[in-house]
Image (tube, rainbow, N blue to C red):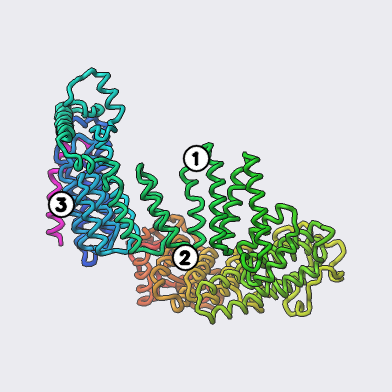
Amino acid sequence: MAEVVQYHLEQMVGELEDLERRDLFTKPELKAIVKKRSKFEYALRRRRVKCIDYLRYIEYEINVDALRRQRKQRKQQQSAKTTLSDFSITQRIIAIFERAVVRHPEDVQLWLQFVEFIKSRRRMSTADADEEDDGHSRLLSQVFARAISAHPYESQLWIKAAAHELEVNMNGSAARALLQRALRLISDDKELWIEYFRLELLLVEKIKARRRVLGIDGEKETEDSEEVQATGSEDTEDAGFIDLPQLDEEGGQDLMVEKLTEKALAQLDQKTAANAGNLTEEQRAAMSQQTNAYLQGAVAQIVFEQAIQAISDDLSFRQELIAIAGQFAGAEQLRQRVLDSIHQDFAADADARAYLCSVHLSTISTESPELIDGLQLAVENFKQALSELDTPEMWAKYVEFLSQWLDASESMKSLQAYFAAQRKRAAAMISESRDARLNEELALSCADVIEADGGDVLSWLADATQRFPDSADLWHRRMSALVAGNRDGLASGVASSSRIDNLFTSQALLQAPDSRKLWDLWFDWTELWFSRKDVSADKVQARYMSAFARVTQQRTLQALSADPDSLAQVQALVAHLQTRYIDWAWKLPASHKPLSAFGELAHAQFRPDDDDSDMEDGEQCAEPVAGNIEALRQAYRNVSRHAFPTPGFYRRCIELETDAKHLAMLHEMACRVDEAESEPWLAYLRFLAGSKQLSQASDVFWRASQTIHDAEQPAFEAAYKKIINTGFVSTPLPRFGATRRVKNPLIPSKDQTKGASEVAFPGPFSPAFSTVDTIPLDHAEEDYQQVLRRIRETRSDCVVVGQKITDVPNPNDPNAQADNPEIVTASLDSESSYYSD
């Protein structure tokens, strides 16, 4: 291993000497670079090398090269001769990438990063006169070939390779061949078909642009003709030449060569155009753009036909093809062909028909005078589609379209009135045929229309909830309207509080028991009546406990089903309701009487209209003050004993609780609820470490290690060590043998150790002596193991004998005596080091 590393380091000698000679790096900096590179090289020679090891090495080399470039630019060495250090770092990075892809050829992201690095270096070499990019294009082609061979089913590699051939090598045929070969392997990949479709349109557009430059078909660009008139040139050989802008770089001779090359190409094109006079009528007609099938997009249309055969039922795929065709001039026929295919293949799809009705608006600007006509045409298209597809989904799309443009046309009153009238008419037509045209989404939209027009929205929502009793959104909308009307005190048409309560408990929450917003609305309404002193806190508590029981029952039913998402949703609802209950109890006024235990709430019923005799006179509930700790404790006792607490519930209780004893109990309960997860245990350990309860922390750590998932064990142990290190190596102390002694706060007092014969270490990384030495964190665990080993062997490091506590004497001080003759002097040498709080 060392020989290989030494070989790689020796290859850097010339580069390092060049960097020092050009005064880009100093000797200490070069030594640091060599040391860092040696570390990376040894890391890459391990038996199991991870991909991240290569990437860290590459990142370091990129940063070094960036620093070299900045210093070179600052020292104004851009015009200096190219030397070894200008390209050696780039070659090293490429070599590291080569070693990485050989070791990890299965990593697609590594191949893509390799490709992006070569592209970035090519762009740098184009802008930097000191570097050459001749080999970058060839190297990139080789990398693409190797990457595709390793991952032939990765569409991104094929697409990037085709883009390289088209943009860099200017080879459209090679780009087409790559995409065709990819489609033979991955015929159902949307991205490949989209890029192939775009490629064919782009190639046609390039040919059209070239014909315009040459003046074929009488379409010569006006800029060229004006340029010829301005120069007064009568030479037809230069008529098709386009002058390139002068670059702000040195090398005028190279620019002259490029200019002459462009002139030669222009002369060849003009000669080809001149020979067009010798063509026959059939040949001339074939070359005409109006009759040339290729220039009219015939190849792109063939690609589209093949694409929809491979991907036939994806509407978004065809929408993307339409968007691409709209970017090219002269592709109107192809765009219309795609639209016709959508109408033919998705005739019964409401999304597709709605898209076809308004697709023409995407080409009209919002400030254009054609917008009014376009909107009217869209409305007529919707009406025509509704006559052919009279379904609730289609009506919902129509109402949604009208609502969107109604909101968007606030500045144009006439247009806003037009859309308002159309939406009202649509709602009336839906109401006439509710059985055939109404669904949940449409019922909500029509409720907005009726409410905006001042109609009887409550009757509409009552009928809608009868038609769709399982719709949580409809029930929420209906109960929100009832609660708002009851709160505002509307005279007629509004249900009483008891009727609202009955609708909540017997219908709404029964039909949609897993709707979070419906439960929130219910408790918002309940707490509103509590704030008005119409109900007591015990009755609100009873309502919460009843909700816990109902939702917990729903969680049990979902656990028996095969849908994990529904179970997770119900579990989140349980945690949310329990947290809400805790927050409500916490915000009760401090003068409020203590909450009752759950057993006393068994017969409590919620009747807002009843006279609550248990409300004390003068009790203030309207303006609660946060911080009722007694109510909080009674609340989480009720949940802990008579419900199924969740980890989120205990987390919220821990955030609000202030007493250490209660916090320890809450942490213990939280760990019991979710024993297999590491986060509750880590929170418990943070609490114990912060309160210096290291013996308990050691016990908790042992219990946690027995229950946590095996996959989380390494991360849990690392987090535990970090907690201990952060808690006990934060304050530097005097070195071992110093005259000033520091009392160890972790040594228990006399009262705490009465009757004890010795003090054991409470956990890892705990101090051994009251006069200690600081050590680096990297050696903390090793030093701790050494202390434990010596304690087991000699038992001479105990700081408690009988009932007396004392400091351990300094072994380097011959005059130092122990406070108690029974203490055995520590047999550790002066080189040992320890640490403490």
In space, the residues marked 1 and 2 are separated at their CA atoms by 85 Å
Tell me where residue 246 sits by quadrant: top left
Mark 1 and mark 3 lie on one chain; the one further toward the N terminus is 3
Tell which tag, 3 or 2, sits nearer the viewer: 3
Q: Secondary structure at mark 3?
A: helix
The residue indicated by pointer 1 is 365
Which amino acid, by three-letter code, is at mark 3? Leu
Which amino acid, by three-letter code, is at mark 1? Ser
Mark 1 and mark 2 lie on one chain; the one further toward the N terminus is 1
Report the front residue among 320 and 818: 320
Q: Position of residue 268 (x, y in %)?
A: 14, 33
Report the front residue among 771 and 561: 561
Query: Which residue range is magenta in the image?
Result: 1-26
Tell which tag, 1 or 2, sits nearer the viewer: 1
The residue indicated by pointer 3 is 9
Report the front residue among 119 and 103: 119
Left or right relative to 357: residue 489:
right
